[in-house]
Image (cartoon, grey):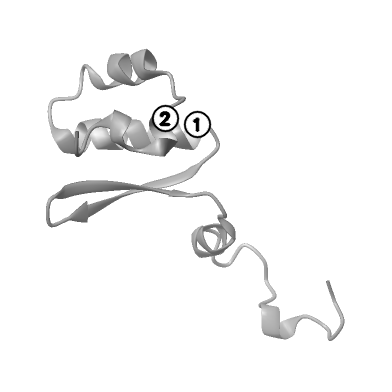
Amino acid sequence: MRGSINSSPAWKNANRSEYLQACSPAETLEDKVRTLVQLRERAGYMAEMVASDNGWLIIENHCPICAAASRCQGFLPLGAADLPVGAG
């Protein structure tokens, strides 16, 4: 079933009833997707919603180093090029 919560491996072990309950007040598909993204973020994933030609995608970054770096721009005053040679 394309586009359903059950079609993605990431959702297979999730608490489906929690998702259904959280999404029930949402009026649009966009609101439902936004709610699911917020639930996934609370579960520890760096999730985001992206519009596609066919609707919405939920992207979960399981190795979120680049995503964290993008979200935390300016968090550290030094860039990687400013680190001393041999650091790390």
Residue 33 in the image: state x and y as whole percent.
26, 36
Q: Which mark is residue 42?
A: 1
- Could you tell me which secondary element the residue under label 1 belongs to? helix
- Nearest the eye: 76 or 31: 31
Which residue corresponds to the image point at 35% horizontal and 38% vertical from the top-left?
8
- Nearest the eye: 52 or 2: 2
- Could you tell me which secondary element the residue under label 2 belongs to? helix
Mark 1 neighbour class, 10 Å CA radius: few under 14, some 14 to 19, many 20 or more:
few
**Image check: 35 left or right of 70?**
left
**Image check: 23 left or right of 81?**
left
Q: How many marks?
A: 2
For residue 79, what is the image quadrant?
bottom right
Question: Which residue has dot 2 on it?
Answer: 39
Mark 2 neighbour class, 10 Å CA radius: few under 14, some 14 to 19, many 20 or more:
some
Q: Quadrant of the N terminus?
A: top left
Which residue corresponds to the image point at 53% horizontal and 49% vertical from the top-left?
62
| Vertical side of 11 occupied by 17: above or below | above
Which residue corresponds to the image point at 51% horizontal and 41% vertical from the top-left?
45
| Vertical side of 43 occupied by 78: above or below | below
Real-space Cα distance between discs 2 and 1? 5 Å
Residue 60 in the image: state x and y as whole percent.
44, 47
- Nearest the eye: 54 or 74: 54
| Vertical side of 22 occupied by 70: above or below | below
Which residue corresponds to the image point at 41% horizontal and 37% vertical from the top-left?
9
Q: Which mark is residue 69?
A: none
Q: Quadrant of the C terminus?
A: bottom right
Residue type at tag 1: Arg
Residue 72 in the image: state x and y as whole percent.
55, 60
Residue type at tag 2: Leu
Residue 57 in the image: state x and y as whole percent.
27, 48
**Image check: 73 left or right of 53?**
right
